[in-house]
Amino acid sequence: MKILPIRLSAPLMGNKNKTNKTSYISPTFVGQDHFIKVNSFADSQVKQFEEDSQAYNKANISFTSSDNTDRNYKLNLSSEELKERTSSEALQIYKLLDEDSIQYQQLDNMDKEALKHLVKAARILNNVYFIQDNPHNLEFKNYIESENAKGNDMATRTLKLFNAQKGVCAKDVQGKNINLADGIKPLPQRGFYPEDLSEKEFHEILMKMLDEGKEEQVEKILNQRTMVIRSEDELKGIDYTDFFKEDFANAAHELELAADYSTNEDFRRFLSLQANALVMNNPYMDALADKKWAKLQNTPLEFTITRESYDDKMTPSISKNSELMRRLNELNIIPYNKDNIGVRVGIVNKEGTDYILKIKEYLPLLAEHMPYKDEYEQKISSNVNKQTMVDVDIVEATGQLGAYRGGISIASALPNSDKLAIKLEGGRRNVYHRQMRQAKYSAGIQNRLNAVLDKSQHKYYDKDSLHDFTILHETLHSLGPKTDTELLGRYKNIIEENKADMGAIVMLDVLTKKGFYTENKQKQVFTSFLTAYVAKGANFNDAHRTRNIMQYNYFLKEGAIKIDKTGKMKINFDKVTPAAQKMLNEIIRIQLDKDIDKARQFVNKYAVWTEPLEKMAENLKSSDKMLNATLVSPLADKLATE
């Protein structure tokens, strides 16, 4: 089915419409034999949307909201703060493919034309993410772009940060809130729910609707692919294909054009299915596209609309309301976190892909080593063809995928387990981002080693070994329990990311004993992983950061690492795998039991910011001035204007 184009005369804008506690623990810490004050994950959830520091000096620039309200906005960061955060030291550049790259030059001319339309589709969908992320993103973006055009230096610097973090509110690598507009703070509901909707009112409205027998409407509100608006004294869920109808239709048109030019039949078929999914209010169409995408292995180009659910904090708040959860469970209504839109466009790198595929034949072996393997179905063990893997040179990354918020994705394993394609026995596809990892793994690494790692173990750091760890991490997302993990609520993603990390370490040992890796390579992977993921601050707002903090505390407890008084870490290589195995066992048990109370206890026990971690963080902050990063897409910029 062909998609009829929708042409508009102007760019598409989309639709507009507790007391703090202090915890104390006494971890194993060399040279310390007393209680130390810490911040915990539980504390963080209370304070996560508050500013972490005193208010900045406000710039003497303001504008009036485009919706004709009386609300005025001001730039939130002072001139000094803006200069610091946009300096070359603080704002690192991640450069994607350029026009002269050999990867682009070697493409067939027809695929070059297809690539142009894929980039245009990605940029159209960027606006969708802005709306999902914060209701003020687009009007603020329009304002600072207009001020930038006038030569306003503060607006120019603010625009740089906005483009880097893809929004008006985000966190930097130290976990600090960076809110670019005075009075605009990150919302637990992001842009998915009405801005004035509180958690308490949200729960009350759902209970009232259930009392009135409106289960179908409630299920739609709690679906991962709906935007929620007020409807009199109730809420209403609107499917993405309807809410973002114009943007989705225009993106679909670009995908159909790309399909016409593509030289690969499988890729053409996928693009047509994805285009159809964008214009049809039917999850089954998404499933068809996902299932086809997951089978792509030998294609010259890559295009993905990622749909991941890390940012929505409103929907999982339901897990805190036991009565509401009980009623939803009785009705078999699962509250799914909302999907953010991200888009990846790239050129498949054959050499990199061939290396990644070497691990594929070991998937059944890895599945056999998963804890409690007899208590769940390990689908990957019976059909490794359901797992495809590619290494990709990135041309463009928009939306959530291109937002640098304390970090950026270097790989993904999709579709996630909540997607219909997985429930329909579809496969998964692992995609690795060459330019992102190359920038991340090479930036200031010697300074990092000097700051956090005992000098005797510097010799084991190896940036290529970080890629090996990432391959194992993404592979582990395909292993383990996959049903009803949504019942773990706001802990679901933290638990899953922990599983992938600890599983990667355990499977690294399996493959080392099998002869795939050497023992020296195993030490390199241990060292590179533990060095690379030391955090610069207590950021519990992100599942990835939270799980890293948990792991360091767990490894400290198990003696796999020690941190001395100066904040230098030393690894006990013999204890790393046993510690990871023990943590993995606990994680899989939680996923199997589907017990949110156990998940809460597990996360709150280890997600604490301790003095040893603070010492390492302070060392890092002294040696590395990076606060954020921004993507630069020279080839995509050229193609988007053709």
Image: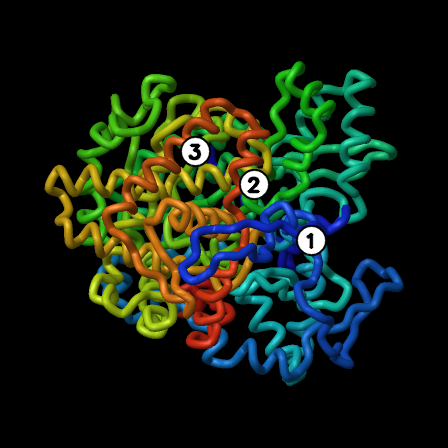
Which of the two labelled residues, at mark 3 and mark 2, occupies the earlier sequence position?
A: 2
- Residue at position x 63%, y 63% from top? 177
Say what amino acid the circle numbered 1 marks: Lys
The residue tagged 3 is: 587
Q: Are marks 2 and 1 in contact (CB under 8 Å)?
A: no
The residue tagged 1 is: 47
Which quarter shows the C terminus?
Answer: bottom left
Instruction: Judge whether residue 184 can be spotted in this image.
Output: yes
Q: Are marks 1 and 3 in contact (CB under 8 Å)?
A: no
Number of other residues with Cα within 10 Å of mark 1, as a class: few under 14, some 14 to 19, many 20 or more? some
Gap in angstroms between the C-alphas marked 1 and 3? 26 Å
- To which quarter of the image does residue 362 belong? top left
Q: Which label sits in the foreground, 3 or 2?
A: 3
Nearer to me, 393 or 475:
475
Please say which color scheme the image uses.
Answer: rainbow
Q: Which label sits in the foreground, 2 or 1?
A: 1
Compared across the picture, whether 253 is left or right of 437 comes to right
The residue tagged 2 is: 339
User: Residue 316 at what x, y percent from top left?
Assistant: 63, 36
Which of the two labelled residues, at mark 2 and mark 1, occupies the earlier sequence position?
A: 1
Compared across the picture, whether 32 is left or right of 578 comes to right
Numbered tag placed on residue 445 in the rendering: none
Say what amino acid the circle numbered 2 marks: Asp
Nearer to me, 406 or 266:
406
403 in relation to 618, above or below:
above
- Residue at position x 81%, y 18% from top? 211
Instruction: Judge whether residue 112 can be spotted in this image.
Output: no
